[in-house]
Every structure is written in C-alpha cells, then in structure tokens.
C-alpha cells in the first residue's frame, strides 16, 4: 500500500515537471538575462561608399578655327566601407577589502564592443573624354583651360580659366565628347609679360623710368597705370624706401616717367633716409584699366641700381 502511494506521488511530480515543447522558448526571459549581464551589443553603423576622382585638364590657345582636343581615358573605382562590432575586454584595478582590515588590489574586467571598419573595392568605371571647341576669338595672350572629371559613374566638365561664358553639349556616354560654344566675352587676367622694363636713369635732378608695351595695339583706347617705388641702397639688406608714385597713360608702345624724390608719396626726409652710397633702384608694376582685361596688379622685377 505504501509503495503504491509513493509511485503515485512520483508520477504526479514528474507530470508537473515535464517540459511542453509545443509552447516554445521564453525569449523574454533570455533577453532580460542578457541585459542584466551588463554587455550591450550596439548595432553596426552602415558603411559609407566613396569613389576615386580622375581628372584631365584640357588647354586651348588662341585660334579662329574649331579645335578638337585629344581623347583622354579616365577611370574611377568604388570603395565600400564595411563595419563590424568586435568584443574587446577592458580591465582595471580596484582595491577591495583584504585580510586583517587591509586593502588589496583586484582586477575587474568587462566586455565592450568596438566598431572596426575596413574598405574593399567595389565597382569600377572607365570613360573617354574629349572637348570640341567651336570657333571663337582669343586675344594673343589669353589661354583657356577646362577640367573633365570622372567620379563613380558621373562625368562632368568644369571651367578652370575661360575668356567666354560657354554653353556645353554632351555627345556619347562611354566615349563622351563635350562641345563648347562661346557666348559672352569675359575679361581674363592681364598678360604679366605685356609690359617690360626699358631703362632707369638719373639726370638733371630727376629720375627717369621707361617701359615698353607689347600689346599697345590690342589695348588701343584703354589705359594703363604704372606704379614706381623708389629705394636707396643700404648695407647688406638694409635698403631705404623713399616713396611711391602712380603714372596713368593711354595705351602706347612706350611709357616714360620722370620724377624727383619730392614727387613721391610717403617720401622720407633726407635726414631719415638711409645714409651711405648714393645708389638707387626702383621696383615697379602695372595694371590695365578698361574692359579688355581684369585690373589685376602685375608685380615686376626691380631695376638695376644707378648712382645719383
């Protein structure tokens, strides 16, 4: 009788303890345990794609006829950034109670996740580029240049230096031809070699500076401003600045400027000027005034030294 009761109790306990496989797993319980463990797994950040940029510069000189450039190969490569979370163990030392009321060092460690990224090659693109410049007129010193760049699948043209506003049409996809049509004229920088030193001298109490203009005919009807800075030579690098003056002329093949020290702006008194050998030189430059070129100042070299 006692044995029968024990058997019944055993089966009752076993029945209450059996697992119901049809009910599935309690995932909520597992997630709570993961959070309570102190380990947080961040979601990986999506990688960023980038493309290499390949550019070619096309330059054009003055010509009244249509010009077609050489064909240039351009290549671009895609790089894909991939990121992953990697577990890293970080440890630090803390002091904990030890025997006999002492403090002893103890190392505590925990796991953190750090993101590690790398790049891998992706797609690649190849294109040819060419520019056809329709007939337009440039001044003798003007030079134009354009950049064509391939970045990923995108092929674009950019102005580097131009004497006109241009409209551009595109022909072809793999072999691309950009056709440029000149619209409105745009002033470019003045030719740095347009004016040249001719002479610098001193006579009858005056300094005389002369310059020549290579483009006098092209600038007919416009003006040029020449700036002359006078210096007195000193010992080693200690030269004395005596003053400056601007001279304005109608465009011509040659320019002559005569002046005394008193004619200069910001001229120094004789007592303030650097004393020593009576040698002088000039630094000079010019700028165009009108519609043909920009009015950028062109700095030229200094003249040979002369004796007063």
Image: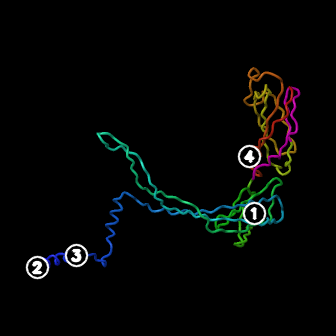
- Tell me if residue 188 comes above or below residue 255 in the rendering: below
Sequence-first disc among 3 and 4 = 3
Q: CA distance from mark 1 to mark 4?
A: 24 Å
Q: Could you tell me what secondary structure mostly forms the magenta stretch?
A: strand
Q: Judging from the image, what secondary structure is the residue with disc 2 in?
A: loop
Q: Which residue is mark 2?
A: 1
Q: Residue at x 58, y 62 (%)?
A: 119
Q: Residue at x 83, y 24 (%)?
A: 278
Q: Nearer the viewer, mark 1 or mark 3?
A: 3
- Tell me if residue 243 comes above or below residue 103 in the rendering: above
Sequence-first disc among 1 and 3 = 3
- The disc at residue 296 is 4
Q: Residue 10 location in percent, x, y? A: 19, 75
Bounds of the magenta segment: 188-211
- Would residue 308 be counted in the magenta stretch? no
State the residue in front, 70 or 87. Answer: 87
Q: Quadrant of the N terminus?
A: bottom left
Sequence-first disc among 1 and 4 = 1
In this picture the colour scheme is: rainbow
State the residue in front, 286 or 78. Answer: 78
Q: CA distance from mark 2 to mark 1?
A: 116 Å
């Amino acid at each position: 009788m006692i044995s029968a009761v024990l058997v019944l109790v055993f089966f009752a306990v076993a029945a209450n303890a059996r697992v119901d496989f049809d009910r599935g797993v309690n995932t909520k319980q597992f997630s709570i345990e993961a959070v309570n463990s102190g380990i947080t797994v961040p979601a990986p950040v999506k990688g960023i794609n980038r493309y290499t940029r390949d550019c070619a510069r096309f330059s054009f000189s003055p010509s009244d006829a249509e010009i077609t450039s050489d064909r240039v190969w351009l290549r671009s490569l895609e790089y894909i950034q991939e990121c992953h979370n990697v577990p890293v163990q970080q440890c630090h030392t803390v002091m904990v109670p030890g025997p006999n009321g002492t403090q002893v060092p103890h190392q505590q460690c925990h796991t953190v996740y750090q993101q590690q990224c790398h790049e891998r090659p992706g797609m690649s693109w190849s294109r040819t580029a060419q520019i056809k410049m329709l007939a337009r007129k440039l001044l003798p010193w003007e030079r134009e240049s354009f950049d064509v760049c391939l970045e990923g699948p995108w092929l674009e043209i950019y102005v580097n230096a131009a004497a006109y506003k241009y409209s551009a049409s595109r022909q072809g996809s793999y072999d691309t031809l950009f056709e440029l049509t000149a619209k409105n004229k745009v002033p470019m920088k003045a030719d740095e070699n347009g004016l040249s030193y001719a002479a610098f001298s001193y006579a009858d109490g005056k300094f005389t500076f002369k310059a020549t203009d290579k483009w006098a005919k092209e600038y007919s009807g416009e003006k040029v401003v020449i700036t002359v800075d006078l210096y007195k030579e000193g010992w080693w690098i200690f030269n004395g600045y005596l003053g400056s003056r601007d001279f304005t002329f109608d465009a011509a093949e040659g320019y002559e400027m005569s002046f005394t020290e008193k004619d200069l702006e910001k001229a120094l008194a004789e007592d303030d000027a650097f004393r020593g050998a009576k040698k002088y030189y000039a630094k000079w430059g010019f700028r165009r005034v009108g519609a043909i070129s920009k009015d950028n100042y062109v700095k030229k070299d200094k003249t040979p030294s002369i004796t007063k």
